Image (cartoon, rainbow, N blue to C red):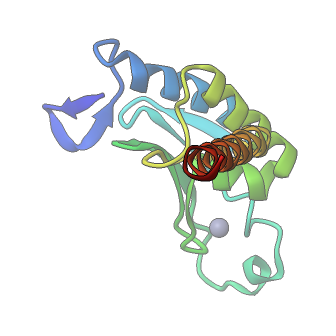
Amino acid sequence: MINNAADPKVLIFTGTNKMWATVASIDAHFLDGVLKDQKWIQDTGGWKGKCPLCHSSHKRKKQTTSYLPAYITPRQQGYVFHCCSCGSTLTTFKLLEVACGKDTAQTYAERRWQAGKLCGAGWNCPLPEIVKRDLEIEKQKRRIAYRNAEQERKLANYRNKYG
Ligand SMILES: [Zn+2]
């Protein structure tokens, strides 16, 4: 992903950075149709549509001003959702979680993990629950192995001294 020379605010994904190109293609796949009346915007390389969070809520009905659209725009850390009506700003993961449910968001995170561990610390997408659980089990195994090794060592020391 590099800065678009014509407009530094607009970030475009390019094939030169394979990692971000992968993230962008996974994001784009899951983001398709998340907004109501979703339309592709050529200029930003993102989408415009109706916010799935506030469009049908009471807040919307009470609004006297005209309806403002929501945007999904590519940024340095991946696609970012922003609604000009309710002011929400969300990452792809959070948007999927609130608009499509926890399962979809988890499937999305799993896809990013499978594509080369493109989630977790330092990423805009958390580790999927299934991976978190596996890592926790691994950590526990290492803890037990370490404790056992420590006990072995103490026992050997004891034997050397008193045995
Ligand atoms: Zn909104």
Q: Is residue 24 visible?
A: yes
Q: Give whichever of 21, 145 is nearer the camera.
A: 145
Most extreme residue toward the left is 5
On the picture, is 106 further left or further right than 81?
A: right
Query: Looking at the image, which residue sits at the far front?
Result: 163
Residue 19 position by quadrant? top left
Residue drawn at (30%, 37%) of the image: 11
The image quadrant where one finds ligand 1 is bottom right
Decide if residue 41 is on the left or right side of residue 140: left
Q: Is residue 75 above or below residue 62?
A: above
**Does any portion of residue 36 appear in the rendered image?**
no
Residue under the point 83% across and 82% down: 58
Residue 49 place in picture, x, y as percent: 63, 49
Q: Nearer the viewer, residue 61 or 53?
A: 53
Q: Quadrant of residue 131?
A: top right
The location of residue 83, given as percent across then percent down, is: 56, 63
Residue at (83, 67) in percent of width and height: 56
Q: What quarter of the picture does the N terminus occupy?
A: top left
Towards the viewer: 156 or 14: 156
Q: Position of residue 77 (x, y in %)?
A: 40, 44
Q: Residue at x 34, y 12 (%)?
A: 15
How many numbered discs? 0
Residue found farthest to the top: 15
> As drawn, is 5 to the left or to the right of 101?
left
Q: Is residue 81 above or below residue 68?
A: above
Q: Is residue 78 above or below residue 80?
A: above
